[in-house]
Image: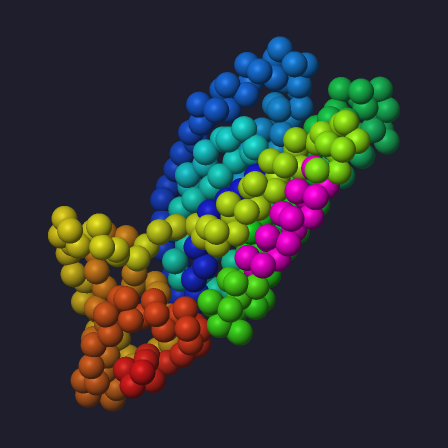
Amino acid sequence: MRTARFSTVLPSTTTRLRGADFRLRIHPLFALALVVSAFTGQLLLLVSAAFAALEHELAHALVARRMGFSLDKIVLMPYGAVISGDIRGISPMQEIRVCLAGPLINALTALGFAALWWLWPETYPYTDVAAHVSLSLFLVNLLPAFPLDGGRILRVLLRPLGERRAVWICRAVSFVTAAGLLGGFIYTCCMAKPNFGALLFAVLLVAGGFGGGAYARFVIGPKDFSRGVEERRVALSAEKTAGEAMRFLREDKYLVLVLFEGGEFLGELPEEELVKILQQEGYSKKLKDCLSL
């Protein structure tokens, strides 16, 4: 029902808060969905889903901020919300905590509505839609598929196998889940009661599978070279790991690591080599071992 863009980087060496304000943008398709829902009697459902999705994304953002990272750009979409920002340098455990924050706040909200019904049963007709939406967001986002929080948690847990292998496994799970939803949609069509929600969810999972559930772009690419980009040179101990070096990456600068061991110059490691090591060897690879690859 919602999707979010996360970056998948380690470890916990960043302490500076990045970004001070949240930026919310409403996609034109969401405005169109509001108009359509007003004429189809689904306005309450859409508004409830929008508030639950915003609550979900703000929980991600607030937990990230407490750790010194920034998820500060939220886009409200017809199917939920998308959040992005800069969490370079985050550790696996911190990333799991950020991922869990969204579903947990939805679960607490659903429990809050249940408590409200216990105390004041007469409120049920006015809050049942919002409660069921919050509960659905909690359950759906724990599915181990991209771009859901469960998919990103699975990728973190599989990271010891290597980033590339972890991503491929998560993609496979996403595509299998999407295939199951597509099969369910076809079945409902055969029963003359097509469930277009299942079809939309399947498309979302396929798109998330290709996207890999990533949050923030930070690697310099060919288009950047065509217009020129500033080089950033960082002197660093070769005993540091590739994951620890990730915190020096900047979206607008090309990174070159100048490696030393015991005061002796060992060599240089450019940005594309560092990213290659991260993808193929993992985050725990020491930089001095990367020079020999």
Q: x and y percent of residue 128 in the render?
A: 77, 26
Q: Is residue 122 left or right of residue 266?
A: right
**The image quarter in which residue 39 lies:** top right
Q: Main secondary structure of the magenta part?
A: helix
Asked whether residue 90 is drawn in magenta, I would say no
Where residue 258 appears, as percent x and y from the top left, is 20, 75
Identify the magenta region. Answer: 170-185
User: Residue at 56% across / 41% down in the picture?
Assistant: 204
State which quadrant residue 122 falls in. Answer: top right
Residue in the picture at 45% in, 33% down? 75
* Residue 210 point in image, percent of width and height: 48, 51
Which of the two residues, 57 or 217, is positioned nearer the viewer here?
217
The image shows residue 286, relative to residue 38, as above or below, that is below
Q: Is residue 171 above or below residue 28?
A: below
Residue shown at 58% from the left, 29% from the top:
50
Observer-nearest of 34 and 134: 34
